[in-house]
Amino acid sequence: MEKKELRYILASGSPRRKEILTSMGIDYEVIVADVEEKTDKTVPEEMVKELASLKAAAVAGGLGEGDWLVIGADTLVWHEGRALGKPADEKQAFEMIRSLSGESHSVYTGVMLTALLSGKRYTDVFYDRSIVKVKEMTDEEIREYIESGEPMDKAGAYAIQGIFSKYIEGFEGSYDNVVGLPSEMLAEHLNEFLVNAGIK
């Protein structure tokens, strides 16, 4: 069956997510979701799934007729029973990295696919989890990293693909998931999604 002309829309302005989607060979456009990222959920996988769903639904709500598929995503760093979001300032960034130093933590990314195909609505929501081990860092190394400016807009105050990579001892699971979008799982779900919708 010939593939239908389908608009792929990424509901995120994240440069990391854009890079991953581009590397997957998907031709897409970006519409940033204008939503308050708040959830009452307390379990990390439920938190990321709900926030990804909020973003995807917000963008989908502004689209008209036609065949489109929206990808919403949310990434969370989870350590010692709490979520580490983006640091509010350098002091908080220091505290976050200090808590991760010499420890293993989890990174969860929730993904929501929502589509309108031939007049029918389809949805799929899932998540992936990776485990990251950070090397023991000195206070001086933490301060030096913070001075680079890299941690200030990152969940958990670090970027595994950036300068911080030298402080990563190892990881289990998907690397792309830690960056912000689990490409392997996304490819599987997208394929199944399109087959079920009769597109592939």
Image: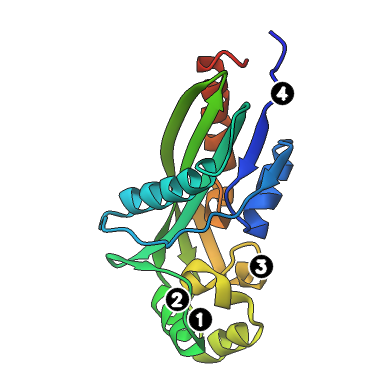
Coloring applied to the structure:
rainbow
Q: What residue sits right under mark 2 in the picture? A: 101
- Spatial CA span between label 3 and label 2: 17 Å
Report the amino acid beneath label 1.
Answer: Met
Q: Earlier in the sequence, mark 3 or mark 2?
A: 2
Label 1 close to label 2 by CB (< 8 Å): yes
Label 3 close to label 1 by CB (< 8 Å): no
Would you place residue 11 above or below residue 197 in this image?
Answer: below
Q: Earlier in the sequence, mark 3 or mark 1?
A: 1
On screen, residue 68 versus residue 80, left or right, reads: right
Q: What residue sits right under mark 1 in the picture? A: 137
Helix, strand or loop for disc 3: loop
Pinpoint residue 32: horizontal percent, then vertical percent.
59, 55
Can residue 110 be spotted in the picture? Answer: no
Q: Earlier in the sequence, mark 4 or mark 1?
A: 4
On screen, residue 36 versus residue 149, left or right, reads: left
Pinpoint residue 78: horizontal percent, then vertical percent.
37, 62
Q: Nearer the viewer, residue 107 or 103?
A: 107
Q: What residue sits right under mark 3 in the picture? A: 162
Q: What residue sits right under mark 4 in the picture? A: 5
Which of pointers 3 and 2 indicates the residue nearer the eye?
3
Who's the residue at 52% across and 46% down the image?
A: 72
Q: Earlier in the sequence, mark 4 or mark 3?
A: 4
- Spatial CA span between label 4 and label 3: 36 Å
Who's the residue at 62% across and 58% down the image?
A: 14
Label 3, residues with CA under 10 Å away: few <14, some 14-19, many ≥20: few
Label 4 close to label 1 by CB (< 8 Å): no
